[in-house]
Image: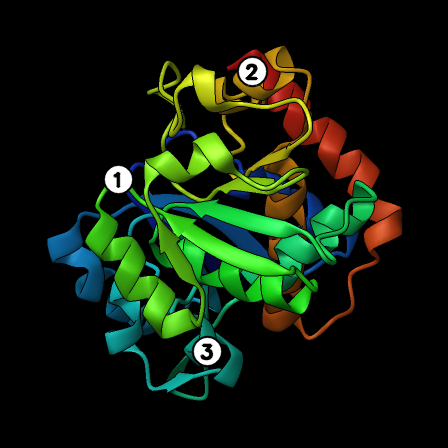
Amino acid sequence: MTLKQSLGVIGAPIAHSLSPLLHEFIIRQYDLPFTYSAYHVEKESLAEAVYGAQALGFRGLNVTVPYKKDVMSLLDEIDEFALKVGAVNTILFSEGRITGYNTDVFGFLHSLAVENVSLSDRDVVLLGAGGAARAIVLAAKKGGARSVMIYNRTYEKAAALAEKMGCVAVSQDYFTAIPDHAVIINTTSVGMHPNVNASPLPQTLFRADCLYIDIVYNPQNTLFLQYATHAGAQTVGGIGMLILQGILAMEIWSGKSIDLQQNFGALQDLLRRALGAQ
């Protein structure tokens, strides 16, 4: 009998995370020696949770809202790419050391490719200035965006991130004169379950010619995406990014290559059914 190592996701809130469903599917498909669970962790217990997982022999952790930046101070090593992003969403425990990675950037870009969406030569506006926003800024630049702007309710946070990442901070007034065919990406948790009646932008600012992307996946059709659809715009939800960043994390933990084409459709159906049942 093969001894199974533990994997998990830590964050707050975490009760409605689909990560266990996603990773258990991959574990079964590839007969990997792991189990995966979700753990609600309060901020004051973050260090205890990470070091406790290491002491208990965990193979790794996913890190979600709101700890992608906070967790970095607890790590022995941080992958060069995660350092560029300034946020960690995947932890590997190996040979007594704790290493942090970021799979959000390529998870996001791969999810757009699946939807046949390109950021090349387009003006991109990010909503939010947290850990996820850092990854999406880098993804937008790697995807060939013509310009990247950051909007946050607290302008100073947007300005600070823009200065670090080499882009521009904007106020809400910017949305009244946004460039044609711009890409608006919600990187905040606004609209996420259970606060489903919230949008990071008022409905009056949505336009038919823009593309709206929400990295929130629960619910599938956030109020942000509903407003965009009502305006006649194209939309992309967050399930694809969840799947792709998860596959990349599992490749780090397992050392195995996970076939995207073979598994994406089945995972998408599985997660959509789960969301529909909630």
Q: What is the x, y in percent for residue 249?
A: 59, 63
Q: Quadrant of the N terminus?
A: bottom right
Task: Say what secondary structure mark 2 lies in.
Answer: helix
Question: Residue tagged by mark 1?
Answer: 153
Q: Residues within 10 Å of mark 1 (few under 14, many from 20)?
A: some
Q: From this viewpoint, is residue 93 visible?
A: no
> Which quadrant of the view contains residue 163?
bottom left
Q: Is residue 148 left or right of residue 195?
A: right
Question: Residue tagged by mark 2?
Answer: 226
Give the mark nearest the N terminus, 2 or 3: 3
Residue type, label 1: Arg
Give the mark nearest the N terminus, 3 or 1: 3
Q: Are marks 2 and 1 in contact (CB under 8 Å)?
A: no
Question: Residue tagged by mark 3?
Answer: 84
Task: Say what secondary structure mark 3 lies in.
Answer: helix
Q: CA distance from mark 3 to mark 1?
A: 24 Å
Task: Say what secondary structure mark 1 lies in.
Answer: loop
Of residue 206 and residue 44, the one placed in the foreground of this image is 206
Colouring scheme, one of rainbow, by chain, secondary structure, one colour: rainbow
Residue type, label 3: Lys
Q: CA distance from mark 2 to mark 3?
A: 33 Å
Q: Is residue 258 left or right of residue 255?
A: right
Residue type, label 2: Gln
Give the mark nearest the N terminus, 2 or 1: 1
Q: Residue at x 79, y 50 (%)?
A: 113
